[in-house]
Amino acid sequence: MNKSARLSALITLSLGAATAAATPTTAPDNSATATTAAMATAPTAATPDQAALIEEARTAVMALGSTLKRELQAAMKAGGPGEAITVCKTRAPEIASAVSEEKGLGIKRVSLKNRNPEAGVPNEWQTAVLEDFETRKAAGEAPDQLAYADVVDNEFRFMKAIPTEGLCLTCHGMELAPDIRARIGELYPEDKATGYQEGDLRGAFVVVKQLAEH
Ligand code: HEC
């Protein structure tokens, strides 16, 4: 089975928890990936562990996403976007660490055009998934539905796309106010995270969890 078919199969699985009964599936033609094939043909029969891990990852993504957005909106209201940039810089990594610790997994955000020069840079598999999200979006899938799940080398991996909203354009849009552009340039001389329009994929949440040996 080629890579993109395999990703789709797993994504079907990841969405299976919510839409198991309604999810049409097709049998992959290559039995070399028997586990994946079994998952894809019968998402309802995915091992309880897999379904539970996906649920756990989704909960962590929601916790991080909603906390970030709440703090961002509060900072914008209290001190304007200049103040909110500082909050994004200091609070975003802190909130990600806090959620990781609380949920017993690793969660962060990455982007093909990252602003944070360390945490925001996707590794090879994350890049492949981000590119796959772009392909699927171009083929008509809804940006807020794009997700991915897999187990590799005993590590559970989950990604969920982050669509660009109107709120994001002040700091990630096509035309930034001069003071915002200047402040971002000062803090992030290597910034790549501008030029977005509403509905574009800004990046993705990444969840990883090391599974127990067995
Ligand atoms: C007030 C300015 C501001 C707004 C508004 C804003 N961001 Fe950001 N964003 C930042 C800054 C600053 C960073 C870098 C944070 C860091 O240093 O970790 C960032 C980083 C990110 C990252 C991490 C990946 C990367 O590029 O390094 C994502 C994903 C992201 N923002 C998405 C969004 C989304 C989605 C919205 C709208 C809901 C949004 N941002 C609104 C300033 C902003």
Image: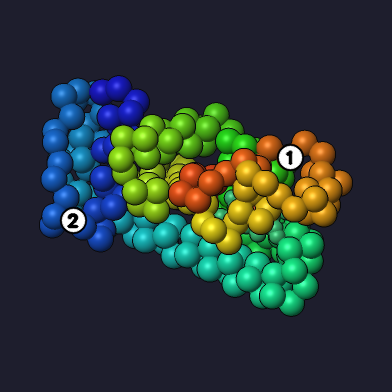
Q: Nearer the viewer, residue 153 or 122?
A: 122
Mark 2 Cα within 10 Å, few/some/many (few <14, many 20+)?
A: some
Residue 214 visible to the viewer: no
Give the SS element for disc 2.
Answer: helix
Q: Which residue is mark 2?
A: 20
Q: Nearer the viewer, residue 74 or 156?
A: 74
Residue 159 visible to the viewer: yes
Q: Please identify the quadrant where the C terminus is shown.
A: top left
Looking at the rendered structure, the kind of residue marked 1 is Asp
Q: Is mark 2 within 8 Å of ligand 1?
A: no
Mark 2 or mark 1: which comes first in sequence? Answer: 2
| In the image: residue 93, left or right of residue 179 | left
The mark tally for this picture is 2
Q: Which residue is mark 1?
A: 191
In the image, what residue occupies the spot 26% across and 45% down?
A: 12
In the image, what residue occupies the spot 79% across and 62% down?
A: 82
Mark sitting on residue 9: none
Give the SS element for disc 1.
Answer: loop
| In the image: residue 139, left or right of residue 175 | left
Q: Position of residue 155 (x, y in %)?
A: 47, 43
Q: Nearer the viewer, residue 191 or 148?
A: 191
Q: Position of residue 55 (x, y in %)?
A: 37, 61
Task: Report, in whole angstroms, how far the alpha carbon at label 2 lies from the one at label 1.
Answer: 41 Å
| In the image: residue 52, left or right of residue 186 | left
Looking at the rendered structure, the kind of residue marked 2 is Ala
Asked if residue 40 is positioned above or below residue 28 in the image, the reply reads below
Figure coloring: rainbow
Q: Position of residue 168 (x, y in %)?
A: 60, 56
Task: Please identify, in this view, whether the residue under mark 2 or under mark 1 is nearer the observer.
Answer: 1
Q: Nearer the viewer, residue 186 or 211?
A: 186
